[in-house]
Image (cartoon, rainbow, N blue to C red):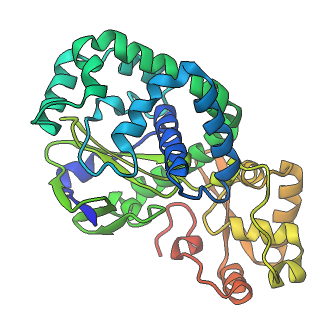
Amino acid sequence: MVIRIHLDEHTLERTRLAISPLREVISGVELVHRTRQGRDAGWPYAEWAAHAASVLRTDPGTGPLRVYAQLYGVDHGRPTPDAFQPAPPSSRPSLADELAVLRATPPEIIAAQCAKHYPEGAPDFLLPYLTDGARAFGLLADAVEVFWERAVAPHWPAMRAVLEEEIVLRARVLAEQGPEAVLGSLSGPASWDAPVLSLPKRRESALTGGDRRLLLVPVVLAQGRPSVSTDDPVTLMVTYQARGAAVLSRRAAPHRERDRLALLIGAGRAAVLRALTTPATTSGLAAVLGRAPSTISEQLTGLQEAGLVSRSRADRQVFYRLEPLGASLLALMDQDSVPAEALEEPGRHA
């Protein structure tokens, strides 16, 4: 089942990108809730999810975060108020910036959204937000800060690095090829068939962009689950899986039983080559693969000399990308297809 979002030209023309620390927290709480329901977090989320679950279980300061599990839990299939996940106020807000918006949620906004989504009456767990919203949203923001400090902040420098690369790449494509090229290459199960963007949902539904801007927010902790926020009259926010979630794990990706590529060019270079199915910088690859930038630089030099990768500049950063020879070698050795976007440098037309 999917939600189909009809995006007119006016909405597409105002497509923007942003990073959201708050959305990382919300997605992280959802991820932990799914593991409690018997879903396997899998690599690279398992280590992080186990630690985050311990934080939620043992730190009473995180108690108010239960509202996110109740709103977005795996068994909850109805639309929910988006006041609990407001759109980022800028393209690169701090967590404090986003929590200021959350704390200042107007009473009329939460009342209107609850009336819209719960015409039969809001569930009991939402009543504090209706009767004393300032206090309830304040406690929720405090809980977000506690969870952030204990579960997300230690990983944030690496997460921020991969998110910054994501924004730079997408912004370049947006400027040179337009929003449809960005929507057509989103990571995860999102599907773009102009003028409709389809996202997995627990029930069939449809909506139009209307007189709103489209805001795309990559999320490391999304675990492949895109989402859309529809209540805001100004912004239609779509979150999607950011590349580089491997920064969450201290362990490398599970070894292949018979890694022919590693036997041919070495395990280090094989890992770098596989990580370049999307363009990346030296520092981004170092964060994703958990290696020193100097080591990654040396491996990239060897791959470039062999004609398997090439480098190009996007803004002030240097990105490496697969050359057709590198993509062909991956396909041959791994007996798997390589995404078409791997063959394109940032902003380059096919």
Residue 205 position (above or below residue 31)? below
x 60%, y 55%: residue: 41
Give the percent coordinates (x, y) of residue 316.
63, 44
Residue 4 position (above or below residue 66)? below
Residue 230 position (above or below residue 304)? above
Q: Is residue 124 left or right of residue 191?
A: left
Observer-nearest of 82 and 64: 64
x 17%, y 38%: residue: 117
Observer-nearest of 175 and 20: 20
Give the percent coordinates (x, y) of residue 82.
28, 35
x 67%, y 76%: residue: 323
Observer-nearest of 140 and 250: 140
Residue 42 position (above or below residue 322)? above
Give the percent coordinates (x, y) of residue 169.
53, 54
Q: Is residue 28 left or right of residue 181?
A: right
Q: Quadrant of residue 177?
A: bottom left
x 67%, y 88%: residue: 335
